[in-house]
Image (tube, rainbow, N blue to C red):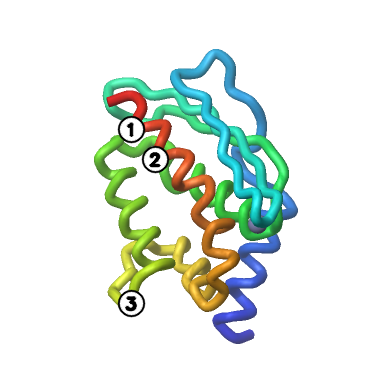
Amino acid sequence: MSLRDLYQEVILDHNQSPRNYGELEPCTIRRDGDNPLCGDNIILYLIIEDEKVVDIKFKGEGCAITMASSSMMTEVIIGKKIEEVEEIFEKFHSMLTEDEGDYEDLGKLKVFEGVKEFPARVKCATLSWHTMNNAIKEME
Ligand code: ZN
């Protein structure tokens, strides 16, 4: 199995069984994210305590990339400090929008690296991340 096939499989798996899917009420912040170009629409629910993401869930409808990216984002940022989350966001965003770099420490999020070749889908892969980042900024 090639690396590309493996990545494809991870994305399909998260799309079929998204992790942390559902609502979280009450929560600290709830935020909607829209990507009209593709028709992706998600809602994020975050519980933040002591500058830390204690819990996160998401809900909504979107293409496989949006769903997988949201699902994996929740897995990655749960339990992390806000400042770590911001760093991961910056790095993930650069991986999809900038030139070659070293993104090894993004771990499994590297499955989205190939999306860069499809500019129209970059918004799908980053939708939940931008939504989460806006939510965090709103708190500051
Ligand atoms: Zn999409």
Element carrying mark 3: loop
Q: Amino acid at mark 2?
A: Asn
Question: In the figure, is residue 131 to the left or right of 8?
Answer: left
Q: CA distance from mark 1 to mark 2?
A: 6 Å
Q: Nearer the viewer, residue 18 or 138?
A: 138
Question: In the figure, is residue 54 to the left or right of 99?
Answer: right
The residue positioned 58% from the left and 80% from the top of the image is 4
Element carrying mark 2: helix
Instruction: Ligand 1: give its quadrant.
Output: bottom right
Q: CA distance from mark 3 to mark 1?
A: 26 Å
Q: Residues within 10 Å of mark 2 (few under 14, many from 20)?
A: some
Query: In the displayed structure, would residue 90 be above or below residue 128?
Result: below
Q: Nearer the viewer, residue 73 or 13?
A: 73
Q: Amino acid at mark 1?
A: Lys
Tell me the residue that label 1 is attached to.
137
On the question of residue 79 being in view, the answer is: yes
- Answer yes or no: do the residues labelled 2 and 3 have beta carbons within 8 Å? no
Tell me the residue that label 2 is attached to.
133
Tell me the residue that label 3 is attached to.
99
Element carrying mark 1: helix
The residue positioned 55% from the left and 33% from the top of the image is 44
Locate the C terminus by quadrant: top left
On the question of residue 57 being in view, the answer is: no
Q: Amino acid at mark 3?
A: Asp
> Residue 124's quadrant in the figure?
bottom right
- Answer yes or no: do the residues labelled 1 and 2 have beta carbons within 8 Å? yes
Question: In the figure, is residue 30 to the left or right of 17?
Answer: left
